[in-house]
Image (cartoon, rainbow, N blue to C red):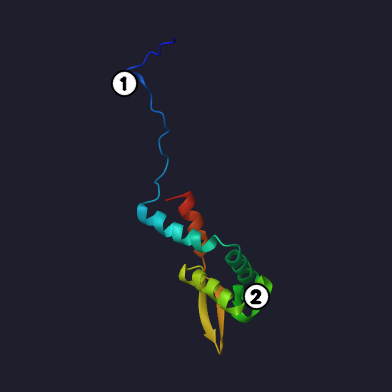
Amino acid sequence: MSTTTLLPITEVGACCAPLTRETLTAAQASGLARSLKALADPTRLRLISIVAASEGQEACACDLTEPVGLSQSTVSHHLKVLTDAGFLSRRQVGTWAHFALVPGALDSVARLLTSA
């Protein structure tokens, strides 16, 4: 039978390294989770990629259905999620909606993860 000697608490060093920067607040974590949820879909990532690769980083909704192989209503749903999350802006041109990347929106997600 082995015995273990316990050291008094004052002799035990800290088990964790100190923080080197500010951490996310509860509100920041909640907002980031909403943003990441909007991005955590392969179709939405493809839509952002297509818009980013389009001239002027803007694309008509009519040009987004074929590349992702989904119906117009499904693509519209994904575009709404991305717009509501602040990654895309929407403007109406006649009967079609045009979507553009919001400058810095993707950068803001990266910034929240790497600094506070």
Q: Nearer the viewer, mark 2 or mark 1?
A: 1
Q: Earlier in the sequence, mark 2 or mark 1?
A: 1
Which residue is denoted by mark 1 in the rendering? 10
Q: Is residue 71 left or right of residue 8?
A: right
Mark number displayed over residue 55: 2
Say what amino acid the circle numbered 2 marks: Glu
Query: Alpha-carbon neighbours of circle 2 within 10 Å: few (<14), some, or many (≥20)?
Result: few
Q: Position of residue 64 (x, y in %)?
A: 63, 76
How far apart are the alpha carbons under marks 2 and 1? 64 Å
Between residue 62 and residue 92, name the one nearer to us.
62
In the displayed orientation, state which residue is furthest to the front.
Answer: 1
Q: Secondary structure at mark 2?
A: helix
Quarter containing the N terminus? top left
Q: Is residue 35 left or right of residue 50?
A: left
Task: Indicate whether 94 appears above or below 2.
Answer: below
Say what amino acid the circle numbered 1 marks: Thr
Q: Position of residue 106 (x, y in %)?
A: 52, 62
Give the residue displayed 51% in from the left and 55% down from the top. 110
